[in-house]
Amino acid sequence: MTGTELPLAGVRVVEMTHMVMGPACGMILAQLGAEVIKVEPPAGDKTRSLGGMGTSFFPLFNRGKRSVVLDFEKAEDRTTMHRLLQSADVFLENFRDGQLEKQGLGADELRKKYPHLIVAGHKGFLSGPYEHRPALDEVVQMMSGLAAMTGTRDRPQRVGSSANDIMGGMFGAIAILAALYQRGGGKGADLGTDIRVGLFENCLFLVAQHMVEYEMTGNKPRSMPEREHAWPIYDIFETASGERIFIGVVTEGHWQSFCREFGLREFAEDPALRTTTDRILARGRIIPRVAEVIKGWNATELSATLDRLNICFSPINRPEDLFADPHVLRPGGLVNNTNADGEAFRVPALPIEWNGANIGEGLNVPVLGADTAAVRAELEAQALSSTGKPAVRLA
């Protein structure tokens, strides 16, 4: 798909963010067709130089953006920033409260100067007692109880990705799309919006199912390693070839098919195992027998059989294994992008299809300041032509 075919073509986003949550929001908007101009300090976004687990942060979350370097110590650059904001639909930031106010870029001041502007701040917390605190993905996972649910109370374990940062960026994008729709839906081009996204509240949303379980039952939710099973077979088993596989038998039809296919007539015909509840209570004798049966199967044949029976299953993969997965490797499953150093890399496409097409092919990670001169020239031409800001960008 070309940029002009994408739904946010014509929308300009000015982004002053770093790390993951704010950049993830900008990356999603860019892939949906928005022009995202990333404003960086002269030394560049510090995320550019991260190593280890942070190596992928900048290229992954800044694909498809333009890079403009501005030094706010210089009056000329401050003027350029305000010209950018005048021309923009959206301003993304993820600084601690009070920092941008020192630059004259606080949300209240911006809304007065640019009534049309949608200001989206990605913060550690929403308004309240903790709003002044910084936060990290690991911090909010510990605070919200997610780490205790993933591991245990004694040994809390964070989720194995920057899940909250990425999901926080998604909520930012959702809110921005809603604000663009509101502004473009006949309610006036000057109807800007002040949006605040909280990393902690994002994680709170993730654990809401456990909070509501407690609210409704009074029972303290058990951690995943200690949880009460909702299904008779919902476990990891070892195959004859030593590979492990997860199998989930979750419906009556699945139970009958599974027992029939794998020679477990003693379970299918047992009157004490007529209901799902009966089977859950009998897991102590069901699971060892199932494990014994699965141990006799080759992983490839087992997967093919479970697939034919329409029973949920999965190999126990690591991230590197996915570059050999046939579904990941389907046309469009991985898109080819180019890093700032010119090196190509593959990344999963945005997890949607737009009119049957995948999104994200051919994006480039910007070289620091690569678009500064071009953007300055565009702003200067706009100022000279006195066209100003269009009344409504999003119809």
Image (spheres, rainbow, N blue to C red):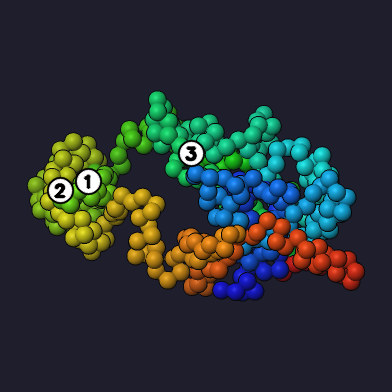
| Label 3: few (<14), some (14–19) or many (≥20) C-alpha neighbours in 10 Å | some
Tell me if 20 is positioned left or right of 250 in this view: right
Q: Nearer the viewer, residue 227 or 28?
A: 28
| Label 1: few (<14), some (14–19) or many (≥20) C-alpha neighbours in 10 Å | many
Asked if disc 1 and disc 2 are in contact, CB closer than 8 Å, the reply is yes
Number of the front mark, 3 or 2: 2
Residue type (three-letter) at the residue carrying disc 3? Val
What residue sits 15% from the left and 51% below the top? 240
* Among the two numbered marks 1 and 2 on one chain, the one whose residue lies closer to the N terminus: 1
Residue corresponding to mark 2: 295
| Label 2: few (<14), some (14–19) or many (≥20) C-alpha neighbours in 10 Å | some
| Position in image of residue 124 (x %, y %) | 63, 38
What residue sits 50% from the left and 32% below the top? 142
Q: CA distance from mark 1 to mark 2?
A: 8 Å
Residue type (three-letter) at the residue carrying disc 1? Phe
Q: CA distance from mark 3 to mark 2?
A: 35 Å
